[in-house]
């Protein structure tokens, strides 16, 4: 059986200050708590032979992967399709500003200077399909809260990508077999098209 382990990165310094970051060129390190979370993830993953680790262009995902895989010979690759949502002009703003903007707009509306939630969802569906097309059997994916949330809810058959699971905790593994990840990708694509 193929195994895909989707994980949100460890707590970042912007998570701790309730600010958003959708630009991978902005350096954002993990907090000490985030490094501890990644260390706890290492313990959870110790009993699984991994073929590859995929992370995004954001430094916090690479840092999480490095801590979680310390001392192991696991190839690490970047998958930009799993990057966090490009929030454009909301970059660095408070999470409440982001939520307020979302309340006044639809999923199809792009953030000013950024992308829409639907566009990001379709990008995530593409990324999951690319993962499924890979040859490796056991793949660790260190990415962001939203792609993990969408995959979990879509695989469960929800009509809402944001529920019922919403707050995805840092460094908690979410397991998918190939059928489950394929179901998630298809459901995300159907819901993003509206």
Image (tube, helix red, strand yellow):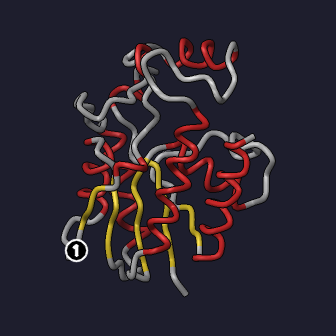
Q: Residue at x 50, y 56 (%)?
A: 126
Residue under label 1: 72
> Where residue 7 sits: x, y (%)?
47, 56
Residue 100 higher or lower than 126, as above or below: above
Residue 153 higher or lower than 49, as above or below: above
For label 1, the SS is loop
Q: Residue at x 25, y 65 (%)?
A: 76
Task: Please state which of residues 17 and 5 is positioned toward the viewer in this rendering.
Answer: 5
Residue 22 higher or lower than 119, as above or below: above
The single residue placed furthest to the bottom in the displayed view is 1
Q: Quadrant of residue 79?
A: bottom left
Query: Horizontal placement of 162 versus 121: left or right?
Result: right
Task: Please state which of residues 85 and 51 is positioned toward the viewer in this rendering.
Answer: 85
Task: Please state which of residues 121 and 39 is positioned toward the viewer in this rendering.
Answer: 121
The quadrant of the rendering that contains the N terminus is bottom right
Q: Residue at x 66, y 29 (%)?
A: 107
> Where residue 35 sits: x, y (%)?
30, 46
Query: Horizontal placement of 182 versus 8: left or right?
Result: right
Residue 136 higher or lower than 45, as above or below: below
> Where residue 108 sits: x, y (%)?
64, 29
Count of numbered tags: 1
Q: Residue at x 61, y 60 (%)?
A: 185
Q: Quadrant of residue 186?
A: bottom right
Tell me the crowding category of disc 1: few under 14, some 14 to 19, or many 20 or more residues within 10 angstroms, Cα based: few
């Amino acid at each position: 059986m193929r195994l895909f382990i989707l994980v949100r990165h460890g707590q970042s310094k912007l998570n701790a200050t309730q600010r958003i970051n959708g630009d991978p060129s902005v350096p954002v390190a993990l907090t000490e708590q985030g490094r501890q979370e990644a260390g706890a993830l290492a313990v959870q993953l110790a009993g699984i032979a991994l073929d590859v680790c995929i992370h995004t262009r954001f430094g916090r995902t690479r840092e999480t992967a490095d801590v979680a895989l310390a001392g192991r010979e696991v190839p690490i690759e970047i998958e930009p399709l799993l990057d966090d949502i490009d929030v454009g002009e909301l970059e660095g703003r408070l999470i409440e500003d982001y939520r307020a903007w979302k309340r006044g707009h639809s999923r199809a509306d792009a953030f000013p200077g950024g992308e829409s939630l639907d566009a990001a969802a379709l990008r995530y569906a593409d990324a999951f399909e690319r993962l499924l097309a890979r040859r490796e059997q056991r793949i660790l994916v260190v990415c962001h809260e939203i792609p993990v949330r969408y995959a979990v809810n879509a695989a469960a058959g929800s009509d809402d990508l944001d529920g019922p699971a919403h707050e995805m905790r840092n460094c908690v593994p979410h397991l998918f077999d190939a059928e489950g990840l394929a179901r998630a990708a298809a459901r995300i694509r159907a819901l993003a098209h509206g």
